[in-house]
Image (tube, grey):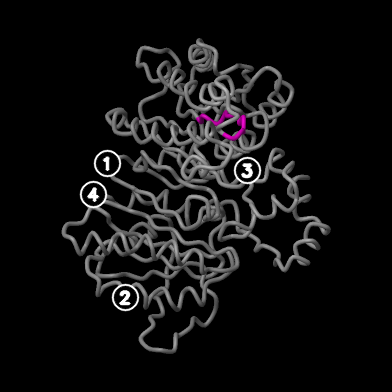
Amino acid sequence: MSALEKAFTSAPGRAISRKAGLKDPPRLRRGRSWPAGAIVLGTVGHGSLVADTLTLLGRTVESPVVDAGDDAPGYGSKIGALVVDATELRTIDQLETLRALLRPAVRGIEGAGRIVIVAREDVDGWEAASVARALDGINRTVAKELRGGATSTLLWTTGDTVSSDLMSTLGFVLQGRSAFVDGQAWHVGHAGDVHREFTAAPLAGRTVIVTGAARGIGAAIARTIARDGADVIAVDIPPAGEALAAVANEVGGVAVQLDITKPDAGRVLAEVVAQRGKGLHGVVHNAGITRDKMLVNTDAARWASVLEVNLAAQLRINDVLLDPETDGGLDDGGRLIGIASTSGLAGNKGQTNYAASKAGVAGLVQAMAPDLSARDITVNAVAPGFIETEMTGKIPFVQREIFRRSNSLTQGGRPVDVAETIAYLLDPASQAVTGQVVRVCGQNLVGA
């Protein structure tokens, strides 16, 4: 635990929280850890996609307890997860089966357990479409009702999705890597007949650029993907050179002092990649700034600086690295990942410029994804909520505590929570996930 994390869980902080009537937040399960209790598999209909995927993941499953009356039955011991295959759900009547599966599980799930619903959104007919949308409301509400750090996730699939497509995503949401992803839904499509494995070092031998890597979330990204085997090119501005070098040395990567707003930034990065001779698997556009002011006090310079760093620089760098003629450019089958924000998805007072840039990142990945599908390049974004960093540590205690408690997990996230989600999207096994914005916010009330 870092010094910052110790500060926000300090005895004085806890004492003040208790005087305000606030309970200690639950301890979240992190890392490549599976649920301690049994993984229970339930089905609505006779779909086999989830069962086949759990087999690929090497997970054994148990049969569910089903509620059939007024008195909800229980599990003999706490279960670790309930995974529901709802890919054949089409009617309102079938929602009763889901309720009967969920009720005992919500009562019997362990701390930091998982509820996962896998369904299809590409369905025909008015009733089927309305029922599919009903699942979104169920998932978000279950996430708010769970306790002890347990989370709920809805995974949308298509008729073409197969178990090897779903494997990486289902493994991510069941493991502790998804600790701060709660009440969210995103899509898993079909990526063709590509052999994929679920391994602890999926990025072994692959080069990944991380901008803004000197501290905070960027440093956590560098450490996490290095754990997963990546050769890290860590990038940050020259004034952060000392901290950047320390991160690069720690992960066995290379430090590049570079202002990403420079017109030749993309070319400089390509040259670094080319010199290493390994190709380029991924780019994580993490670098970003805030220049917060109410809109009536925001001048042109303050506006432009945020949009330049957070959005325009990405576009220029992408143009260079996506050019097939660029030596050191992004490989086919590569990954582009942007950092959006819950502020961009919902807006935030005093952050018009920042919200514009982060909403722009979300729009960018959604626009780029289909255009790059022919090269098997996926483009996704991660949208953090309140994450405990040096910057948020400077917020006054009461205001900071409000931000922490304004989500279903009643705490701030850690930089590693963002990093783990990015590592999942970088994984070659995540080929079927593209054009998505995954919120890492503990189901923050902002934009919920």
Observer-nearest residue: 277 or 313? 313
295 above or below 137? above
- Tell me, for residue 160, which label it has, or none: 4
Distance, label 1 to label 4, CA atoms, is: 11 Å
Name the one closer to the observer, 339 or 214. 339
Numbered disc 3: secondary structure: helix
Residue at image coords 43%, 22%: 315
Q: CA distance from mark 2 to mark 4?
A: 24 Å
For the residues marked 3 and 4, what is the alpha-carbon distance in whole angstroms? 35 Å
Query: Which numbered dot is residue 97?
Result: 2
Comparing marks 1 and 2, which lies closer to the viewer? 2
Query: In this picture, which residue range is highlighted in magenta?
Result: 284-294
Q: Which one is in front in this view, the residue at disc 3 or the one at disc 1?
A: 3
Residue 193 bears which disc, if any? 1
Q: Does residue 441 appear left or right of residue 329 in this picture? A: right
Residue 4 picture location, percent across and down: 75, 45
Q: Main secondary structure of the magenta part?
A: loop
Which residue is labeled 3 in the image? 415
